[in-house]
Image: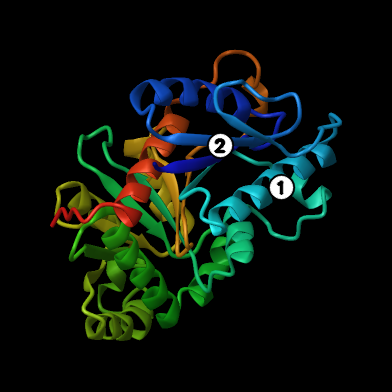
Amino acid sequence: MTAVAITLGDPRGIGPEVTEAAVRAFRAERPDVELVLLGPRDSDPGLASYHDVGPWDGSEEGAGRVAGAAIHQAVALALAGSVRALVTAPIHKPALARAGFGATGHTEMLQELAHATAVGMLMASEETALGAPLRVLLATTHHALRAVPDLVTEDLIVEQTLLLRDGLRAGWKIAEPRIGLCALNPHASDDGLFGDEEARVYRPALARLATHGVRATGPLPADTVFKRALDGEFDAVVAPYHDVGMAAFKTVAFGGGVNVTLGLPFVRTSPDHGTAFDIAGTGRADPGSMLTALRLAVQLAENRFDSPRERR
């Protein structure tokens, strides 16, 4: 039986309520999947096995403390083999910091706890507004735009593309993934007119990736590569920085996308939204992305650990 741990996130946000709604819907679909919820005392919705991570005192620091404790305990369950996947409801980074957690967010904390050498942030929507799937790996994540050119190195492109190739093979059972590399500069620099990264960084990265047998194409202009992926030419795209990837992704997958962390010894997914403090408790929170994250976590875990199926 596949087992999944679900952390409730920041108790002040919509995490607990969208989790409860998603779990109710998912249990009707897949009663065979074991679900383990982790959150603060007095937040147990009574729908699954519940791990109490301690009381919440109502403060921001306390919210960060219970949210961080849930993540730590969920990772411990995964590393012990008790669960095969984690689904994480949204946290609040300032609250984590106030509670004394050094990591700046979920991805960094999971990498640290799992002792993973490298991780990747993959945004995945298996059915976009246009129908076709779109999967976008953000090679760099939360950085000022002015810092991005120095961060996009040959080594980074190779590392992140290999993580993506391996993740698509294991989780999606795509035997030979086709990957498009989104250029950094407009028009992929037009042969050096608008920058040299395409020649200086991407060209040697592509040569190295070829030695690993990776089917990578690029560098391709940002104004065409995502359309080509949606048309079925690529199984996924590597975006050089956060907004160029997220702008394209959320245009066609807003509210239905899933954040997948690659490079961990277990599956981890999360919804593509934040804590939404302004609507918490009003009944307006949409559980759709949380339900999609739960469905995808189970699919990836079953493919990765159980199933020999291959899509291509």
Q: In which quarter of the image is residue 31?
A: top left
Residue at x 37%, y 36% (from the top left corner) = 295
Q: Name the residue under label 2.
A: 36
Side (left or right) of 311 relative to 302 = left
Label located before the other in sequence (2 or 1)? 2
Q: Nearer the viewer, residue 155 or 197?
A: 155
Residue 196, visible in the rendered structure:
no
> The residue tagged with tag 2: helix, strand or loop?
strand
> The residue tagged with tag 1: helix, strand or loop?
helix
**x, y percentage for residue 269?**
46, 46
The mark found on residue 205 in the picture is none
Number of marks in the image?
A: 2
Residue 108, visible in the rendered structure:
yes
Looking at the picture, does residue 42 appear above or below residue 62? above
Side (left or right) of 208 relative to 311 = right
Q: Mark 1 points at which residue?
A: 68
Quadrant in which the C terminus is drawn: bottom left
**x, y percentage for residue 88?**
55, 42
Q: What residue type is labelled 2?
A: Val
Looking at the picture, does residue 255 appear above or below residue 133? above
Q: Quadrant of residue 209?
A: bottom left
What separation in Å lies between label 2 and label 1 (alpha carbons)?
Answer: 16 Å
Q: Which amino acid does label 1 sit on?
A: Gly
**x, y percentage for residue 243?**
46, 52
Residue at x 76%, y 29% (from the top left corner) = 41
- At label 2, counting other C-alpha atoms closer than 10 Å, the crowd grade (few under 14, some 14-19, many 20 or more) is many
